[in-house]
Image (cartoon, rainbow, N blue to C red):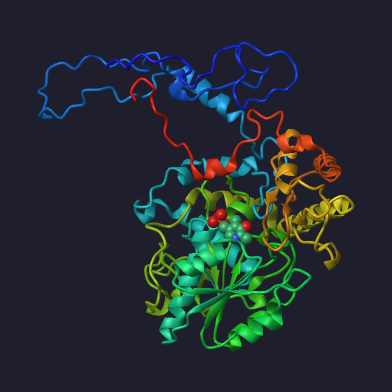
Amino acid sequence: MNAPTKTPNASGWKPGTPVEGHNAVSGPDTVTGNRALMLEEPLIFEIAGNGSTGVDLPEPVGGTNRLGGMERSAPIGLPGLSEPETVRHYTRLSRQNYAIDLGLFPLGSCTMKHNPRLNEKVARMPGFADVHPLQPVDTVRGALEVVNELAHWLIELTGMHGVAMSPKAGAHGELCGILCIRAALEARGDAREVILVPESAHGTNPATAAFAGYRVEDIPATADGRVDLEALKARLGPDVAGVMITNPNTCGLFERDMKAISDAVHAAGGFVYCDGANFNAIVGKVRPGDLGVDAMHINLHKTFSTPHGGGGPGSGPVVLSEALSPYGPLPYTARTKDGVVHLIEEEGAEAFSQEHFGGSMDSFGRMTAFHGQMGMFTRALTYILSHGADGLRQVAEDAVLNANYILRSLEDVLHAPFGDSGPCMHEALFGDRGFAEGLSTLDLAKGLIDEGFHPMTMYFPLVVHGAMLVEPTETESRAALDQFIGALRSVAERAKAGDESLKTAPHYAPRRRLDETQAARKPVLAWDDPNLV
Ligand SMILES: *Cc1c(COP(=O)(O)O)cnc(C)c1O
């Protein structure tokens, strides 16, 4: 099949002319558009546009065409590249990515920590990597033991009763927890309609509650960035199904009133959902079960170092209190009467329970077809076992120490809205107060790209103007933190001094400032072959 002849570089780029939007760092233009090792790379369709093909298929011999005249008569326009050309294309593109393996990734509320290579080694062992969920149980005992062992650790670390392992991300876990709450309320014939969510909550919290059919109401924050306990108590009543509270919260602060909040919610007949995405700050130090939490998702891909942010699938097991455990989704893991954690309980055989202990069938159903993210379970358990109980506690301590180091090192140049509320937890929060007229958090973030760093989380939480949320994690060394602090300090000083060049930053990235509004509102997601249109 012959592909149509296309002009190379259909995007209009001509050798020797700087590509539109490409960085125009001072220095002579290159004829290729490349700048040393930073290679200009068109779309794969554009470079493969000369009718070439990556594979040679023999002309079909014999056989009768049974397509009844329905066969394709025009080429479908797939790019034709050889294997080395294809590999080079994607490798070049990959070099324009930022990754945790390249440098500090300060994205707040994301826990971008180093992913130990040991995790990868274990996850690639054939007994874990190549199992199929429909294999006979007898052939996957080791894999099931991994799930059970991880479940055991999650229950112990959180002081909870049971855990649903199958949810596949934090947000999926939130839905799982809220569906447990709904099932528990329905079981007692109690139709409640409202879920209370603090102003500073991650967007997934109100989205989850609304998706599960609840009306969402805000709980205000106090001036020191925490949930207003009195306002919460005043709102509680027979229509409130529960609250969703992130602890530590998205202002990087520990909710000190958590136990009082839980007691008040329980006294009013509701349930407490805790968003556990920030568990890294308290793992080994605080057990959410002791604070009265009924359900909490754990982002294995944050706290327990399984790759994320484009690097791997998430995994969001949900730990449950004794009150909610009977309603958890199948398959299911929980403490039995003797207090031991069991994955199953079928005549001594290890398999996933399709029924709850004691034969109760109150489960709200399933979250996934099978058991969850096996690869992430293996990585998370490897991480947990290689750290041990004391190592996990130190993770939390070091993560908090690193964040406070950043907070205190920068509060003289960047406004720290809750800097007076005491130490932060695992993330440092700054606002844009003091920036020169016309310069914003966005400009500072773009300036940070020129310094070789991925920007921090911006404009979240919403309660702080021009918010910048920085989460260094425990895996950064003092030297790495100092380098980042130096870079951020310099860009912050430029923002305060009114350095106009920040408005057009980044200047050294493969592309300069993009129109992000246009990109979000009118994304160009398809490539039209100029020779076919
Ligand atoms: C990351 C995060 C979530 C959502 O987790 P996903 O795995 O991305 O779905 C929810 N809440 C908070 C506070 C988070 O940081």
Count of marks, rendered view? 0
Asked whether the viewer can see residue 4, the reply is yes
Residue 349 in which image quadrant: bottom left
Give residue 414's position: percent from left, percent from top.
83, 52
Above or below: residue 296 compared with residue 16: below
The N terminus sits in image quarter = top left
- In the figure, is residue 26 to the left or right of 31? right
Residue depicted at x 71% and y 77%: 228
Above or below: residue 504 compared with residue 250: above
Pick whichever, 143 or 184, lies toward us: 184
Give residue 447's position: percent from left, percent from top.
75, 38
- In the figure, is residue 38 to the left or right of 364? right
Asked whether the viewer can see residue 342, the reply is no
Residue depicted at x 62% and y 10%: 31
Residue depicted at x 78% and y 53%: 432
- In the figure, is residue 353 to the left or right of 149? left
Give residue 48's position: percent from left, percent from top.
43, 18
Whereabouts is ligand 1, in terms of quadrant? bottom right
The C terminus sits in image quarter = top left
Pick whichever, 478 or 452, lies toward us: 452
